[in-house]
Amino acid sequence: MSEKTGWHGFISFHKFISRTLIMIVYVIGAAWITISGIIYIIPKTERIPYLGEYTRTSFLRILIGIGIIIVGNLLWRIICEAGIVIFSIQDDLRKIEQHLDHQKT
């Protein structure tokens, strides 16, 4: 077994788990952003002194909730993709290094 694969590759930081971790964090974050947007849209019960309670959802609140869902998920995707690109560059550099090492031998 090569020194850069398996358990030794993981311990010596030749094998990275960051890419998979970023994908998992992306899914959790996207779900959280979407749920937050939906919760923001849900009508709020307000209590007005001497008039009692009533429930209302304004058009602005609906637009902001939809904005949270769309813009929030888009920005979150861009942030996570930037992290994946950084680790992809590292993977490509490692492949180039291995190819050059192979050509020397």
Image: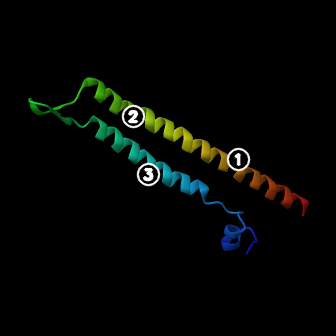
Q: Are marks 2 and 1 in contact (CB under 8 Å)?
A: no
Report which quarter residue 78 is drawn in.
top right
Amino acid at circle 1 = Ile
- Disc 2 to disc 3, C-alpha distance: 16 Å
Instruction: Give the residue drawn at x 66%, y 46%.
Output: 86
Q: Residues within 10 Å of mark 3 (few under 14, many from 20)?
A: few
From the image, which quarter does the N terminus lie in? Answer: bottom right
Which badge, 2 or 3, is on the more N-terminal residue? 3
Q: Position of residue 30 (x, y in %)?
A: 43, 45
Residue carrying label 1:
89
Please tell me whether residue 17 is drawn above or below residue 30 in the rendered image.
Answer: below
Q: Position of residue 87 (x, y in %)?
A: 66, 50
Residue carrying label 3:
28
Instruction: Give the residue drawn at x 28%, y 35%.
Output: 41
Q: Residues within 10 Å of mark 1 (few under 14, many from 20)?
A: few
Secondary element under disc 3, as helix, strand or loop, is helix
Residue carrying label 2:
68
